[in-house]
Amino acid sequence: MFERDLSTVHSRLVRGGIKPQHAKRIVRELLDHYTDIATELKDRNFNNEEIDRIAKSRLGDAEMIIDATLAHPELKSWAYRFPIIIFLLNPLLIYALSFVPIYTISFVCAVIMREWGINFFGSISVFASYILTPLSCFGWYLFGCHRKTPYLYPLLGILFLTALSTVINFDTSAIVSSDGAAPRFSIMIGLSLSHPIESYLLTTVLTFAITGMLVAFTKFYLKKPVLFS
Amino acid sequence: MAKTNASFLSGAPELLILRLLSHREMYGYELVNAIRTVSNSEISLAEGVIYPLLHNLEAKGFLRSKDKVVAGRKRLYYAVTSKGQKRLDLLVSEWQRVSSGVNAFLGELNV
């Protein structure tokens, strides 16, 4: 019974923005405290029913503990304290940084494996342009689920990221000369605010569709309506 | 046992916790019992509320926590850091200043 109360406390704390490690530790400490009170009362010959009642009364009700914890902003996660930075600026940074290893690998492949490497380079470019956005969005969605944030900010992050990907154009090329000289690469990154490319728009639609399915799956099948709290 | 009037205790739990933990490291249950013993049961809080306070003080760098196994049970012990000691000194001087001011009102008033 008490374990069920603690499970509620944990869930409410995480949903209220408390860092998961603090929520987990508070629950563990409350359980230890309950056990200590129970041991103390058992030594004084109280029966199990009285022990449970007195221990709960001494600990205070769940609402009081939850309110007391939520009153401390220092215990809240960054996702709750600075949602704009976490869900709008971080995706941009991660999205941009994720291109670095991908292009590094493809450059190395092109230099070492010549023709085959050039083809690989082309495939990687397509992957980076079209697939990274949905992948970044899924990562962001899962992070939001883990932190049980309100739905607004992760969805805004996805919107921001996909909107960005529709107006940023990547044009990559690699040329291998027949005289054995080193391959030449070019990557052009451009902004087309007035004419977003159709394929990027498709990526946007795809991203939203898959994210929507994930949200629906979470809500209806896993019975965890974390993004609708 | 009646719970202590919360409005009279504003800021005091932090002082009590830092003071007790500056004496020696303790875990939550031990700390609550120490508060009750030292205050002759005059100060009584909902015991579960001590943990958010401890976590908050730790997050601010006033306390540090460490797992220890004692008599076969794993306990989370809290101790005061040097930053916490400075905070305690400040709280003690503030408390003494305020309480002497309030005490002056409890004597004979000549206004």
Image (spheres, rainbow, N blue to C red):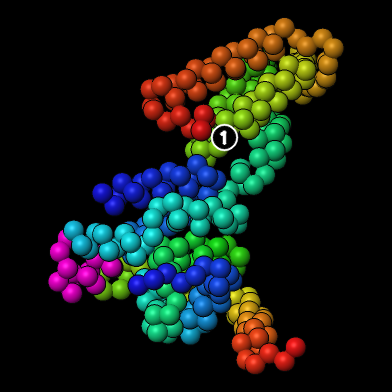
- In reply to whether residue A47 is colored magenta, the answer given is yes
Where is residue B70? Give x, y as percent: 30, 73
User: Would you say residue A51 is visible in this rendering?
Assistant: yes
Q: Is residue A6 left or right of residue A22?
A: left
* Quarter of the image that includes the N terminus of chain B: bottom left
Q: Residue A85 appears in which quarter of the rendering?
A: top right
Find residue B26 and report its horizontal and vertical position in percent. Answer: 42, 76
| Vertical comparison of A107 with A201: above or below | below
| Quadrant location, the C terminus of chain B | bottom right
Q: Amino acid at mark 1?
A: Pro
Most distant residue in the front direction: B111
Q: Which residue is mark 1?
A: A150
Mark 1: few, some, or many residues within 10 Å (few <14, many ≥20)?
many
Q: Which residues are magenta?
A: A35-48
- Residue B105 x/y as whole percent: 65, 86
A47 relative to A151, above or below: below
